Image: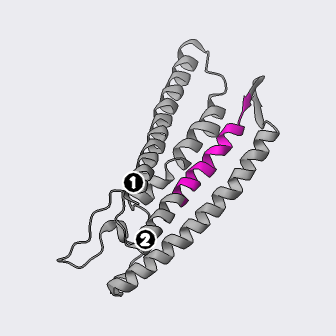
Amino acid sequence: MHALGRLLAWIVAASTMVGAAAVILMMLQIVADVLLKNLINAPIPATSLIVSHYYMVIVAYLPVALSEKLNSHISVEIVFRHFSERWQKFVIGIVWLVSALVAGGIAHRLWFEALKKLAVEANVLESGLKIFIWPSYFVLPLGFGLFALVLLYRFACSVTGLASGLGETPVDAESKQLPASHEPT
């Protein structure tokens, strides 16, 4: 189970690096477009389309599993903190399972939408240029699918009691509080 967690952590890191690369490429293309437009009146064709249909989609959706791996999703813990440790683990497990099912359902539906866009070779025309946008439709199911896998992995670890390989910290025995990686998402 630990090896699977390490593999998932590596895949999450790789998807995050692709997202980071997209941010850098987006910045470079926008700066080059503005400079070329203002200096020699020759902007890069279809920059707005490429930015909105590729870079922004990759930046927003591909690294979505990172926030779950780092336990950085927003959570409201007003009532949760008053539960016993056993109830906290139970509630967290249910939240992980339901969240995984929802994210997996979204990924499933988006996958078929991406296949439809591929079948019709979805594209956009701008200034006489034909830009294929169907590849960007596959980013969303990949991002949500990876998110669902991380959630399912967390649920499986909580049910089996086996150590996770995602990089969580162990439970602090002195304070009897769950580590940050076990708080609800």
72 relative position to 103: left or right: left
Q: Which residue is mark 2?
A: 75
Q: Position of residue 122 (x, y in %)?
A: 78, 38
| Residue at disc 1, secondary structure | helix
Relative to 136, does residue 126 appear above or below in the rendering? above
Hey, what amino acid is under mark 1? Ala
Q: Residues within 10 Å of mark 2 (few under 14, many from 20)?
A: few
Q: Is residue 143 magenta?
A: yes
| Residue at disc 2, secondary structure | loop
**Camera-nearest residue between 151 and 129:** 151
174 relative position to 10: left or right: left
| Residue span colored magenta | 131-148
Q: Position of residue 28 (x, y in %)?
A: 48, 26
**Camera-nearest residue between 39 and 137:** 137
Q: Position of residue 44 (x, y in %)?
A: 61, 21
Quarter of the picture containing the C terminus is bottom left
Q: CA distance from mark 1 to mark 2?
A: 28 Å
Hey, what amino acid is under mark 2? Ser
Q: Position of residue 168 (x, y in %)?
A: 32, 61
